[in-house]
Amino acid sequence: MSIKNLDQLSQDFTQLLESEYNYNVVIEIGKQPNNQLFKVHSAILYQRSLYFRQKLTNSHLINNNASWLRLNFSLIYQMRLDNEKFKTLQQFCNDILVKHPIILWGKVRTPDLPSNHGEWTDKNFKSLRNTLLNCLPHVRYFEISSKDVLMKIKPYYKILEKNVWEDILAKHLDPDMSITSLILPPCKKATVQLPLCNVSIITPSSPIITIEHAAMISSWINRRSTIYDTTKIPYKFKLLLRGSKDGFTGEVFHRLYDNIPGIVVVVKINCTNEILGGYNPLIWKLGDNDREYATTADSFIFL
């Protein structure tokens, strides 16, 4: 490679860092209110720093950031997990796939899917497939019972490669038939929890907030030093306003939120997928002069 090409490559990498495009690591330096956040890329950290290489390849992430890994496990699969040094992290993600139905996870994170499956178009199936693209190769299709294949896979067969779906049918009709699809070895089921929307906690399901988010927010509301287990969340979250459906105007906000205490507002930024929001334990109220103030030490915002 010529010196000119190397110089251009260096400039391209510099622009990537400045734009923060597709970053997946945030480093916080200092303490609030004088802290600074640096948005960086794990692949570059891994290659350029022995310290981060060790942190990214051993079980440090699993032991200290398991919640983040579960929320972003599809992103983790986009990294090169076939390296021997990533075996522990790979097994962590595989255990999640074994224990939990990824279709539900994918539907929550795929925008604009009709609630009625019968109304889905080819475009809808393609969108779901793109969401689950890095997960589908790790599903043990040939360990699934015939009943579950019929009830849980057949409705979504369009997201599978054609040969995979045909091999699933062939194996159930004739277990001795030779197939071309890779048959993955059985996995031991784990007891980890994947953040799927639970209708008993979040009603209706939301493409932004998950049950794990609900556990975190509930912990902040109650000023807990540790995050609630997702099976022990003390609150129920009811969707009152969806901006994409109801609009984002102040009039809509006050019409749907006024006089209701304990409001959590959550917003997802399209270009970065960042989630931000806030909590107000008091009621929102639009006064006669369009202004009415109150004070509390229990409200907070989050990013």
Image (spheres, rainbow, N blue to C red):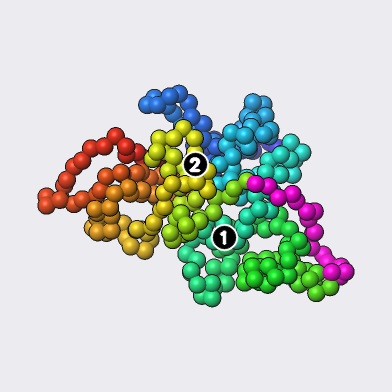
Q: Residue at x 71, y 39 (%)?
A: 88
Identity, as a three-letter code, of the amino acid under mark 2? Tyr
Q: Residue at x 70, y 66 (%)?
A: 161
- Per the rendered image, the range of residues in magenta is 175-191
Question: Callout 2: 10 Å neighbours few (<14), some, many (20+)?
Answer: some
Q: Position of residue 130 (x, y in %)?
A: 59, 59
Residue 57 circle label: none
Disc nearest the viewer among 1 and 2:
2
Question: Callout 1: 10 Å neighbours few (<14), some, many (20+)?
Answer: few
Compare residues 3 and 29 and report the one nearer the observer: 29
Position of 257 with respect to 136 (left or right) is left
Position of 157 with respect to 216 (left or right) is right
Distance, label 1 to label 2, CA atoms, is: 22 Å
Quadrant of res 253: bottom left
Position of 166 with respect to 175 (left or right) is left
**Relative height, residue 276 to residue 139 (above, below):** above
Residue 104 circle label: 1
Residue 228 circle label: 2
